[in-house]
Amino acid sequence: MFLWKFTRGYVKIRMRCMRPEKMVNLLLAEGISLHNIERENKSTITAVTETGNCIPLVELTELHGGEACVLEQRGLPVLLRSLKSRFMLIAVLIIGFAAMCILSHRVLLIDISGCDALEPSEILSVVADCGVRIGMPSAKLNAERVADSLLNALPTLSFADAGICGVVLKINVSEYNSAASTEENTEPCGIYADKDCVILSIVANKGNAAVRKGAAVRQGQLLIDGDITPEGSSERVLVHSRGTITGQVAYRFSVEIGKTAPKLCQSGNSCEYTQISFPTLFKGKKMTRESRVLYDEFEITLESCETLDAGLLPVRVYKGRAHELVVAEKNLTYDEMTAAANAKLDAEMKSSIPKDARIIAKSTDFIQQADGTLIAVLNVQTIENIGYIQYY
């Protein structure tokens, strides 16, 4: 009986009406079977019926002026409905998780920061030319290529960086500062080239551009003229020139490295050296003790290592010699000479090239002389801000 009830499904209901016995007979006459009928009070009874009879029972009871409510539902149909709703929920969760996994590996947003004079739309145009699209797989995006394309396409940029952060393509740019003075000064002046260069872009906010893009100019040459006197006018009109100029500048640095240099060398004197090492109670920490060395500068060469059994804490004893080091002239190898030359050239380059300049090309040539010295020549090409103000 229980198996049959479980298979068909059953519900426990409460019926409230004026004559419960007559209502039970009416339901039985309609083919709605009831079991486990219990009286709660004069007008209320509880009973158990099959799940399929629940809705007709409630409708028939209400039709005859009574009311019925479900107290509990049991059986296979209820279980199947519960599982169906759970399966739907699980299916939605699986689909949502799969969609989230797919979308998490795609570019959904583009965040641009650092724009000043440039409009974000100009950045987005270059990014689109690189093949970047919303929804494209992140693995197919070459962020380094995007940054290089921005620098090549927009000469006013001194720095550009692109990278993927989750589903966001983050682009950070920095523009060259204005070549003209930003002070509120109205004294007539012109803007002149402060170094030899090739003009990449020139924007005259006040005054007239004296050269065009692509022109090779020399240091001191007029770039933006503050003389805007109209043709045929007898009265001269001068303004305080303002504008932004970027140019490609070539630098050349050279250094000479001798074949010898003062270095710390072993003097030939040495003494015995001993070091004792043992672990402590702190994880990863060791305590060491070493013999005293009388030399100011020295280097250690270890010759042996011995482990002593000291119970729970093993002790290691290292033995070797401490060699005295003194400053002496020593012949340099070719690698040492090139390393020294690169260090000097790098220092000269950093002191001569503006910090906001963008290096677009750099090459170093080494020339070995007959006397053993090495000449290093560094050629650097940059894109940087050009111009200085000269008052009339």
Image: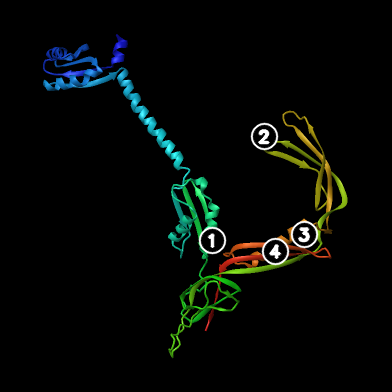
Element marked by disc 1 = helix
Question: As shown in the figure, which amino acid type bears the numbered disc 1?
Answer: Leu
For label 4, the residue is 345
The residue shown at (23%, 21%) is 70
Of labels 2 and 3, earlier in sequence is 2
Q: How many tags in the picture? A: 4
The residue shown at (79%, 32%) is 308
Residue situated furthest top in the rendering? 1
For label 1, the residue is 151
> Is residue 274 shown above or below 307?
below
Quarter residue 43 falls in: top left
Depth-wise, is mark 2 or mark 4 nearer the camera? 4
For label 3, the residue is 337
Estimate the spatial distance between the alpha carbons at disc 3 and disc 1, rounded to whole Å: 35 Å
Measured from the top left, where is residue 140 in percent x and y? 51, 47
Choose between 244 and 264: the one closer to the eye: 244
Element marked by disc 4 = helix
Q: Is residue 217 left or right of residue 172?
A: right
Q: Are marks 2 and 3 in contact (CB under 8 Å)?
A: no
Q: Is residue 94 left or right of residue 310?
A: left
Estimate the spatial distance between the alpha carbons at disc 2 and disc 1, rounded to whole Å: 56 Å
Depth-wise, is mark 2 or mark 1 nearer the camera? 1
> Is residue 328 shown above or below 98?
below
For label 2, the residue is 281
Estimate the spatial distance between the alpha carbons at disc 4 and disc 1, rounded to whole Å: 25 Å
Question: As shown in the figure, which amino acid type bears the numbered disc 3?
Answer: Met
Measured from the top left, where is residue 306 in percent x and y? 80, 34
Measured from the top left, where is residue 78 in percent x and y? 30, 21
